[in-house]
């Protein structure tokens, strides 16, 4: 069970939108409705921002949205803000185990 | 407000056992809804799920770590624990305990994390 594949880095200017992909296999992302995303600013604890593919916990702005197609899940952040700069991790359930993506560093230019 | 706090040695010698405890306050570990998890992050690297436990003792482990990991729960103390045997430098990481929000792998509650270094 290798890590889910994410781009190492993405960037965008304030106000723009960015999308981070998370590619797995038919054994995890492809068949799971339990895909979550975490935001981790430098030196901080990870924070849940998306669960069950496209649901947001209370308090997470609707600028954050999730989706899935086949073996790839995606996180879209619209209206980029400076404090969105962080590492982002996807995570998928795979029957009897859980697998994270390698992480994507988002830089707000 | 649910609070999770990791505790344990910050330094472990190679080949020895890493033992950590997560103490839960503000809620019961015996809830019939949530799994509790250990997740780690080596310095400068990504997140890695180690395993999860239900209050009844049902456990799931990362397959590549399964032979070295035991996660247990003590409902009387509202704690759950991680034991990782035969550690090497590759096990050096910040170790987090976490709880699901109410679904599956939606870890909405995290401890602050504790750095464990494996070194002689």
Image (spheres, coloured by chain):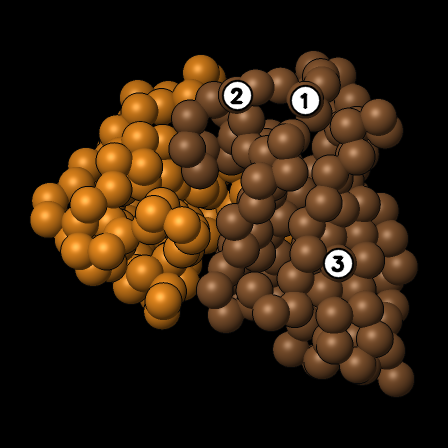
Q: Position of residue B75 (x, y in %)?
A: 77, 28
Helix, strand or loop under label 1: loop
Q: Colour of chain B?
A: brown
Residue labelled with disc 3: B83
Q: Position of residue B61 (x, y in %)?
A: 53, 55
Residue under mark 3: which chain is it in? Answer: B
Asked whether, in this view, residue A32 is left or right of residue B12, the answer is: left
Tell me what residue is drawn at x 51 percent, y 34 percent.
Answer: B107
Marks 3 and 1, Cα distance to the nearest angstrom?
20 Å
Instruction: Pick the residue in front: B46 or A71.
Output: A71
User: Do circles 3 and 1 both sit on a common chain?
Assistant: yes
Residue B90 vertical placement versus A109 (above, below): below
Residue labelled with disc 1: B30
Residue B93 vertical placement versus A56 (above, below): below
Asked whether, in this view, residue A62 is left or right of residue A17, the answer is: right
Q: Position of residue B55 (x, y in %)?
A: 65, 30
Helix, strand or loop under label 3: strand
Marks 2 and 3, Cα distance to the nearest angstrom?
24 Å
Q: Which mark is residue B33?
A: 2
Helix, strand or loop under label 2: loop
Residue A75 vertical placement versus A22 (above, below): above
Check the picture and name the quadrant holding the N terminus of chain A: bottom left
Based on the displayed image, in which of its 4 quarters is residue B37 positioned?
top right
Tell me what residue is drawn at x 40 percent, y 50 percent.
Answer: A96
Residue under mark 1: which chain is it in? Answer: B
The numbered mark, 3 or 1, whose residue comes first in the sequence reads 1
Marks 2 and 1, Cα distance to the nearest angstrom?
9 Å
Q: Local crowd at mark 1 within 10 Å, few (<14), some, or many (≥20)?
A: some
Q: Colour of chain A?
A: orange
The numbered mark, 2 or 3, whose residue comes first in the sequence reads 2
Query: Do the residues under discs 2 and 3 have CB atoms within 8 angstroms?
Result: no
Tell me what residue is drawn at x 65 percent, y 62 percent.
Answer: B69
């Amino acid at each position: 069970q290798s890590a889910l594949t994410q781009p190492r880095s993405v960037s965008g200017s304030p106000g723009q939108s960015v999308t981070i992909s998370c590619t797995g296999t038919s054994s995890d992302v492809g068949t799971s409705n339990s895909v979550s995303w975490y935001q981790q600013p430098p030196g901080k604890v990870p924070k849940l921002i998306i669960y069950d593919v496209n649901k947001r916990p209370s308090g997470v702005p609707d600028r954050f949205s999730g989706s899935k197609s086949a073996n790839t899940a995606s996180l879209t952040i619209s209206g980029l803000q400076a404090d969105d700069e962080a590492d982002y991790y996807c995570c998928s359930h795979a029957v009897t185990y859980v697998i994270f993506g390698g992480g994507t560093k988002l830089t707000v230019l | 407000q649910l609070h999770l706090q990791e505790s344990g040695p910050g330094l472990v010698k190679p080949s020895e056992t890493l033992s950590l405890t997560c103490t839960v306050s503000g809620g019961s570990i015996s809830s019939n809804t949530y799994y509790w998890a250990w997740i780690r992050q080596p310095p400068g690297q990504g997140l890695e799920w180690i395993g999860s436990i239900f209050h009844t003792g049902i456990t799931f482990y990362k397959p590549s770590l399964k032979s070295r990991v035991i996660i247990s729960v003590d409902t009387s103390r509202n704690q759950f624990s991680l034991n990782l045997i035969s550690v090497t430098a590759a096990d050096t990481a910040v170790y987090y305990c976490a709880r699901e929000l109410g679904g599956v792998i939606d870890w909405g509650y995290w401890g602050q994390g504790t750095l464990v270094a494996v070194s002689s």
